[in-house]
Amino acid sequence: MPNLKDLKVRIDSVKSTRKITSAMKMVAAAKLRRAQEQAEASRPYAQRMDRMLGSLAAAAAGQAGAPKLLAGSGSDQTHLILVATADRGLCGGFNSSIVREARNLARELLEQGKTVKFFCIGRKGRDQLRREFGERIIDTIEDIARPSLSFDKAADIGTRVVAMFEAGEFDVCTMFYAEFRSAISQIVTPQQLIPFAPPESENGEEEPEALNGAVYEYEPGEEEILTALLPTNLSVQIFKALLENAASEHGARMTAMDNATRNAGDMINNLTLIYNRTRQAAITGELIEIISAKEAM
Amino acid sequence: MAEGKVAFELVSPERLLLSEEVEMVVVPGDEGDFGVLVRHAPMISTLRPGVIQVHDGGAVTESIFVAGGFAEVTPARCTVLAEEAVAVAEIDRAATEQRLSNAQDDLLDAKTDSEKAQAERHIAVAEAMLKAAS
């Protein structure tokens, strides 16, 4: 028979766990709102950048002198995988699902005899990848979202990636992050950063204004603009991914903590039931003892 | 859309800074300033650090400093993608001077070409900012 005191202790401990999880849920909800706002605010820039780049890339594609960031280095032997995860756990399957996708790609590439390198943004991704790909992780960036996520930080990563590419350290760069759909649904998305792959236009969105067949004039020249635009675009894409990731992380944490709070509630109910039954049984037992003692006299 | 006006948008990676319909904007292109009126030929240009002037009703209504970026012009619109933008009136002289001297120190410390180029870029931005503020 469970001890009454033990039960009491357990109920109290589950209660304090529930307090923590519900507080974490509230914090995550507040942070989610902010992250979502930030993600939405950054969208216009990315959209316009895409539009500009799309028209430029179409014009420059196939030309002999196209910049390497657009055309690639002519090989696909070495792959760099950028894994954007959170720095903290307790957010359900968020980190694991990103890492799982990245790992699958890495295994596939390794089977084909390619070289794979990892660049982790976020501590959790590194922790999970270290076991299998320890020596392939070239660097990890931690705490990028503290105190706040800014474009400068994304630009720093972008510059480093470009510098590595130009030094010939890799040929293809793919980034994994979780795209934010809603608080309960985040979709792990691989995105090829280098060479530049124009995003497939979603749901067949038409250009709002026709240029009447007019083509853009480029000032100074197409190539100069492209060489300036491509690295910036890389930073923008990374920034966008990080913002999406931040929103997804808080969404995932909110859901996870909501579940945890609910589970804790269920557990408390069950334990309280057992506690009351046990107490009742003890009382009944004592009564029987008293009555039978009296009758015996 | 109002007749004879261009839709001008100024966007930074973090947010949409300005979106309004104006008569004319003067944008500091890499190869010289250019004014954009409605029905301008479509073009894409890189920007140098300088001041964007928004003209409305024949006078300059707003001056905004940008530290470089890109401009996309279509017959009806002018979109500026700026990495950094501040209203000229809000430029902090002291902070900018500090930035300039930091950048100059960086240039002296720079070892690689890319560090040097970056420091030079920062100097150019800070100098243009000071010039805009004066």
Image: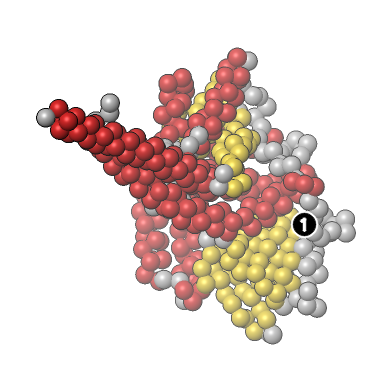
Residue for point 50% across, 34% down = A93
Residue for point 36% across, 60% down = B101
Q: Is residue A272 visible?
A: yes
Within-10-Å neighbours for mark 1: few <14, some 14–19, many 20+: some
Image quarter in which the N terminus of chain B is found: bottom right
Of B74 and A106, the residue lying toward us: A106
Image coordinates of residue A38 in percent, x first then y, are 53, 56
Disc count in the image?
A: 1
Up-down relation of residue B42 to residue A156 (above or below): below
Label 1 SS: strand
Q: Amino acid at mark 1?
A: Glu
Residue for point 50% across, 66% down = B128
Of A20 and A53, the residue lying toward us: A20
Q: What residue is pinned by disc 1?
A: A217
Task: Answer left or right for B28 relative to A163.
Answer: right
Task: Answer left or right for B52 relative to A214.
Answer: left
Image coordinates of residue A31 in percent, x first then y, are 46, 53
Here the colouring is secondary structure
Task: Answer left or right for A217 relative to B64.
Answer: right
Image coordinates of residue B32 in percent, x first then y, are 65, 65
Residue for point 74% across, 72% down = B6
